[in-house]
Amino acid sequence: MSKDEKSTDSNEEGSKPEDMEQNSFQWLGVGVEFCIVVVACMLFGHWLDTKADTSPGFLILFFLFGFGGMLYSMIKRAGGLKWWK
């Protein structure tokens, strides 16, 4: 095996360490976005609960809405569900 073949074998996708670091930071940002969106939805649900006196109905509803929406967004960004097609 030549030196070039070994380097491509050790790095399966052919990405450089710099690319891997950038990709890591991209997914870290997605995680932070996930948390912010879920917490914002929960706060909005709590606010609606205080206005409509329906505690904790809207809080739970908007938590599920935020969590489901962000989960869908993360799956789409990761390339979708390959087995679904």
Image (cartoon, rainbow, N blue to C red):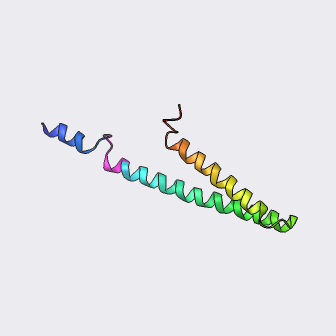
Tell me the quadrant of the picture where the N terminus can be found: top left
Residue farthest to the right, as pictured: 52
Task: State the image coordinates of residue 40 (x, y, percent, origin top left).
Answer: 68, 61
Task: State the image coordinates of residue 41 (x, y, percent, origin top left).
Answer: 70, 59
Q: Depth check: 57 or 72 in front?
A: 57
In this rendering, would 32 be left or right of 68?
Answer: left
Task: State the image coordinates of residue 59 (x, y, percent, origin top left).
Answer: 74, 63
Residue at image coords 48%, 57%: 28
Magenta span: 13-19
Task: State the image coordinates of residue 72 (x, y, percent, origin top left).
Answer: 60, 46
Magenta residue check for 29: no
Magenta residue check for 17: yes
Residue at image coords 78%, 62%: 57
In this rendering, would 80 be left or right of 1?
Answer: right
Residue farthest to the left, as pictured: 1
The mark total stands at: 0
Residue at image coords 55%, 48%: 74
